Image (cartoon, rainbow, N blue to C red):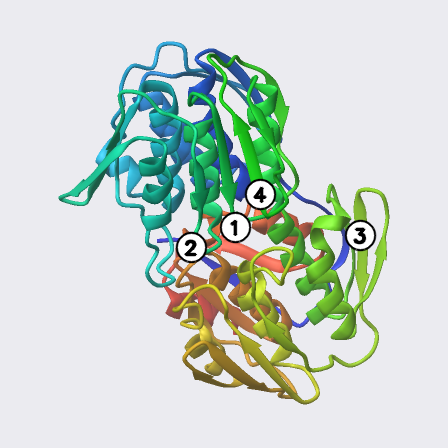
Amino acid sequence: MEKFVIHGGKPLVGEVEISGAKNAAVAILPATILAGGKCVIENLPNISDVSASVDILSAMGAHVRVINKHTLEIDTAHITATSVPNELSRQMRASYYFLGALLGRFGKATVAMPGGCNLGPRPIDQHLKAFVALGAKDSVEYGMISVESDSLRGEDVFFDTVSVGATINAMLAAVMAEGQTVLENVAKEPHIVDVANFLNMMGADVRGAGTDVIKIRGVKQMHGCTYSIIPDQIEAGSYMVAATITGGNVLIKNVIPKHLEPITSKLEKAGATIEEFDDSLRVYRTGDLEPLNIKTMPHPGFPTDMQPLMTVLLTLAKGTSIITEGIWENRFRYVDELTRMGANIQVDGRVAVIEGVQELLPAPMRAADLRAGAALVVAALAADGVSEVDEICHIERGYEDIVEKLRGLGADIKRVEKPAGVLRQAAL
């Protein structure tokens, strides 16, 4: 099994290019099923979650042609299967988007309960609520979710909780339903808007994405198109934190600064200086890190995916910080790894109290999930000495070429397969 070996304690300096948004890509790829023809998807991140989505499409009969590292041509004209292979759908949480796409085109779909990171219960009741409102029947047996309808009809749907997944799945199912669908209390994240824009490029009529209410007028048929995915706000935020915690100076390119405003605001309060340009940001820090109070919330609040990274940053702040997790129950499981590095963090349910320390110490660590893994990499970059991060498969689900990008900023990081003991001896 591979791991990262990181010799930290050096400021990150230079430029880094941000990849396409993971959370948009894993919804847009299933959405190509609705086209029933050829779609060219540009700015795809080269990550394992995208590979898993492509494997599912191929297994179901789609023709996938690689144009370049970040561009695929996907022809879904010949898809006839309406069931996603069990072993493939369990690889990633976002496999549930195939439910909405298949239901929208074929009137039925079967997908395994989603996999991905274990951040606590991930109920799909709001997804099913939307499907049932549109006229589908649902069943869950032996870990498989099935939905079926003779004729989908537009309807008003009010979500009990704000859910990114349910919002997107409802859009996918509704775009070819007869009549008008009104979705209320929807998620407003940038990738919601990106998926809506993609659907409209394929001939859908989706309005209001990015607000509390989305209205969809059903169309009889959709078609292929060429579409470029937005930059990844969480990858950008991760490099912003890495530059700040190491006291570096990094130009972060291919971003939409407006998407980063909740992150930028908190980092500036923590002591970072951030200069905004049209499609890039410069992040640097010269003074001390200041403590913060943060509560994660749906967009435009502070994103839950950035919570582990901000926790790492605040371990070195001059004072006491409080982070409240407003989305997921199990998002502080990585804290034990940080305490091994000398961090002073007390967790009570969804609240973490962080007392800043002088320094983080190098240590061997294990990535429990995607964003926690990225946070441990950032912690290792800040610690003066050699750290190891194991189970990096989680990290590579959402970060393209992370080793190469960090090396381009001057980091001493490498991917290895040797036993940890041998690595420590070699480092000494």
Residues under numbered marks 1 and 3 in contact, where contact means CB atoms less than 8 Å apart: no
Looking at the image, which is closer to me, 253 or 157?
157
Nearer to us of marks 3 and 2 is 2
Looking at the image, which is closer to me, 412 or 284?
284
Distance between the Cα atoms at labels 4 and 3? 31 Å
Distance between the Cα atoms at labels 4 and 1? 6 Å
Tell me the amino acid under the disc marked 3: Leu
Which residue is labeled 2 in the image?
160
Distance between the Cα atoms at labels 3 and 2? 37 Å
Count of all numbered marks drawn on residues in the image: 4
Q: Secondary structure at mark 2?
A: loop
Q: Residue at x 28, y 31 (%)?
A: 136
Q: Is residue 214 rendered to the left or right of residue 89?
A: right
Tell me the amino acid under the disc marked 2: Asp
Task: Kindly identify which numbered label has been placed on residue 213.
Answer: 4
Task: Kindly identify which numbered label has been placed on residue 292.
Answer: none
Q: Earlier in the sequence, mark 3 or mark 2?
A: 2
Q: Earlier in the sequence, mark 1 or mark 3?
A: 1
Measured along the vertical axis of the image, is residue 326 above or below residue 147? below
Tell me where residue 123 appears, x and y as whole percent.
32, 54
Tell me the amino acid under the disc marked 4: Val
Measured along the vertical axis of the image, is residue 208 above or below residue 124? above
Q: Earlier in the sequence, mark 1 or mark 2?
A: 2
Nearer to us of marks 4 and 3 is 4
Tell me where residue 117 appears, x and y as whole percent.
38, 55
Which residue is labeled 3 in the image?
281
Distance between the Cα atoms at labels 4 and 2? 14 Å
Tell me the amino acid under the disc marked 1: Asn
